[in-house]
Amino acid sequence: MPSRITGTRFHPAGPSLPSSTTDVDATPFWLLGACFAFVLLGLVVVAAFWFLLVRGSRKVAGAALNAQVEETIEDWAEDHGYELLGLREADARDNPFTGRYGNWGGKRPGIVMRVKIRDRDDRVRRGWILLLARGAVVYLGYDPGTLEVEWED
């Protein structure tokens, strides 16, 4: 019994191949556009991860991180009976912790702050405080357990 399919041609041997390249439909433009958009989106995602993770999100979320650093140092000062008189970021090349922190060379990222305090004996002291980051490649904030102090005197 012959097969009958309505609306299309049926050939028992299957579809025939085109006789020349002009018979082949060109790739639809929407498919080319979708591929381009997919590649572009991938590049944007990779660039964003590099910027946030490798380069350090300290530059992206500076205000929040400064607040975290200030809060950590204020807690440290209170725990040791110090009155915090001044706090600012120290020069990265002119402090006693130079070479012990960084983003490259297997070092943990960190920040050095210049601090001025008044102790229980009413002495004013100046020094540097080092805080290291929790993550090496992925930045996860500063670790209060790594706080180190180096005094001028």
Image (tube, grey):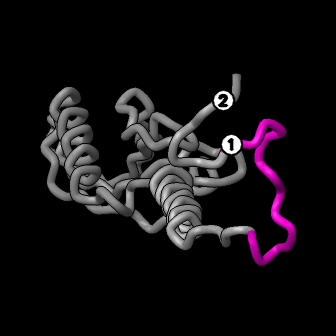
Mark earlier in primary sequence (2, 1): 2
Give the quadrant of residue 119: top left
Magenta-colored segment: predominant secondary structure: loop
Residue 94 seen in render: no
Magenta segment includes 48: no
Of all residues shown, which one is farthest toward the bottom?
Answer: 22
Residue 121 vs residue 18: left or right? left
Closest to the observer, 25 or 125: 25
Residue 60 versus residue 13 in the image, above or below:
below
- Measuring 77% from the left and 77% from the top, which residue is drawn there? 22
- Measuring 37% from the left and 40% from the top, which residue is drawn there? 141
- Measuring 67% from the left and 69% from the top, which residue is drawn there? 25
- Measuring 57% from the left and 68% from the top, which residue is drawn there? 28
Within 10 angstroms of label 2, few (less than 14), some, or many (20 or more) residues? few
Residue 55 in percent (x, y) is at 52, 59
Closest to the observer, 16 or 98: 16
Closest to the observer, 54 or 23: 23
Residue 107 vs residue 15: left or right? left
* Label 2–label 1 contact, CB within 8 A: yes
Q: Amino acid at mark 1?
A: Phe
In what element is the residue under mark 2? loop
The residue indicated by pointer 2 is 3
Residue 26 versus residue 74 in the image, above or below:
below
Quarter that holds the N terminus: top right
Residue 87 versus residue 23 in the image, above or below:
above
The residue indicated by pointer 1 is 10
Residue 153 in percent (x, y) is at 41, 51
Q: Amino acid at mark 2?
A: Ser
As measured in the structure, the alpha-carbon distance from the residue carrying label 2 to the one carrying label 1 is 8 Å
In what element is the residue under mark 1? loop
Magenta segment boundaries in residue numbering: 10-23
